[in-house]
Amino acid sequence: MARIKGALATRKRRNKTLKLAKGYFGAKSKHFKMAKQAVMKSGQYAYIGRKQKKRNFRQLWIARISAAAKSNGMNYSTFMNGCKKAGITLNRKMLSEIAIHDAEGFAAIVEKAKSAL
């Protein structure tokens, strides 16, 4: 009886890696050994990038809120402290959107935060 050596499974696994490496420069998209290394490294970068994306957006929202609060005569930390004491539970993303699109609404929130201090 013939021995099955798993050529089909090996080919499928290699083709899957090569498909992920499509568009990479030079041998990284053609040779399995180099493609495997490149795909593993790109996976690590993607994982790290998903964490960094959250940090970067939070940093952006804080910068926007800070700029809007300064234009209303308050700094960021006292504004956030005032919001907490006033019971305003809007997150930073929403506060930054309000600061960009609705200046009067943000000014009202700043006044509430000032009065709570």
Image: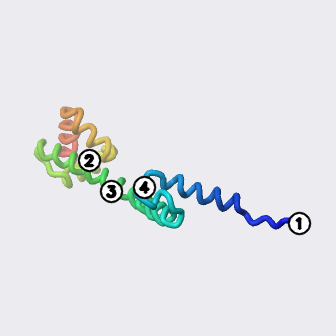
Horizontally, residue 77 falls left or right of residue 23, namely left
Q: Real-space Cα distance between discs 4 and 1?
A: 43 Å
Give the residue pinned by disc 3: 55
Give the residue pinned by disc 2: 83
Q: Earlier in the sequence, mark 2 or mark 4?
A: 4
Q: Residue at x 40, y 57 (%)?
A: 25
- Image x and y of residue 113, in percent: 21, 45
Residues at circles 2 and 4 in contact by the CB criterion of under 8 Å: no
Badge 1 crowding class, 10 Å Cα cut-off, few under 14, some 14 to 19, many 20 or more, is few
Q: Earlier in the sequence, mark 4 or mark 3?
A: 4
Q: Kindly state the secondary structure of the residue where label 2 is placed.
A: helix
Give the residue pinned by disc 4: 24
| Foreground disc of the pair 4, 3 | 4
Q: Real-space Cα distance between discs 3 and 1?
A: 60 Å
Amino acid type at mark 1: Met
Q: Residue at x 30, y 44 (%)?
A: 88
Q: Real-space Cα distance between discs 3 and 2?
A: 22 Å
